[in-house]
Amino acid sequence: MRGDLPEFREWSIAAVQLLKGVVYSDDQRVWNILLSNVSAMETYFARIGLRLVVDEPEGMAYLRQLTEEEASDGYDSLPRLFRSSRLSYGQTLLCVLLRDELRRFEEEDLRNERCVIEETALLDQWKAFFPVQNDDVRQQKDMLASLRRLEDLGFVRRFSEQPPSWEIRRILKARLPITELERLKSQLATAVQRKESSGSSAESEG
């Protein structure tokens, strides 16, 4: 019955949006509600094993699971609401390319508010990590499949159909900090070198 419901709290609007994904400052109504109720929401989410992260300079807020060190005094018995999912090689590669693009944008582009990259430019970068003889159409399909996966994770969103382009979302900075970016770039560079060496050896044997 309606009378059984607790008194409505406006911050519930922001709480639901956070459970669905990242809240950005360009959603002004939800963002303002969130900023006005941070303390209450921190307490609410902590009770279910989540940490509210509000990054005002970046204009975003999101939830993360409590770490093992944070989840003490019984909180370690809570079921996990968020589970990390392993990314494929292509998805990881795309994260690195997009994160690097976001870093360049922040360092060099002082005019635009959104970091947008065209599919054709992204595909050119993508191809550099695969053998030259690979089918271009297949590579594009693989890249788009990886893009859609990252879109599901909230890292990118479609910006324009003509020309096809994508906006790189700022949450990628939180999920892939610079130290992790450099580590992955080093791993990818090593993998490419091994593939090139393997390819050269096969040609020599042929």
Image: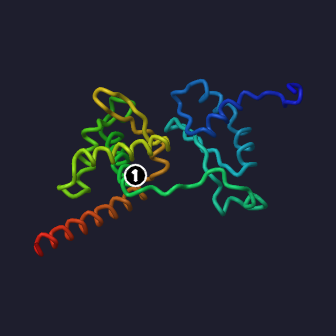
Q: Residue furthest bottom?
A: 205
Assign a secondary structure to mark 1. helix
Q: Is residue 10 above or below residue 77?
A: above
What's the residue at 67%, 49% (across, down)? Answer: 50
Q: Is residue 75 above or below residue 152?
A: below
Which quadrant: the N terminus? Answer: top right
181 horizontally vs 175: left or right: left
Q: Name the colouring of the figure.
A: rainbow
Q: Identify the image quadrant of residue 205.
A: bottom left
What's the residue at 60%, 38% (across, down)? Answer: 20
Q: Count numbered badges in the picture.
A: 1
86 horizontally vs 50: left or right: left
What's the residue at 20%, 65% (across, down)? Answer: 196
Amino acid beneath label 1: Gln
Residue assigned mark 1: 91
Residue 107 at what x, y percent from top left? 33, 42
Residue 26 at what x, y percent from top left? 51, 27
Q: Is residue 116 above or below residue 50?
A: above
151 horizontally vs 107: left or right: right
Residue 129 at what x, y percent from top left? 26, 56
Which quadrant: the C terminus? Answer: bottom left
What's the residue at 29%, 66% (across, down)? Answer: 190
The crowd level at tag 1 (other Cα within 10 Å; few <14, some 14-19, many 20+) is many
154 or 182: nearer the eye? 154
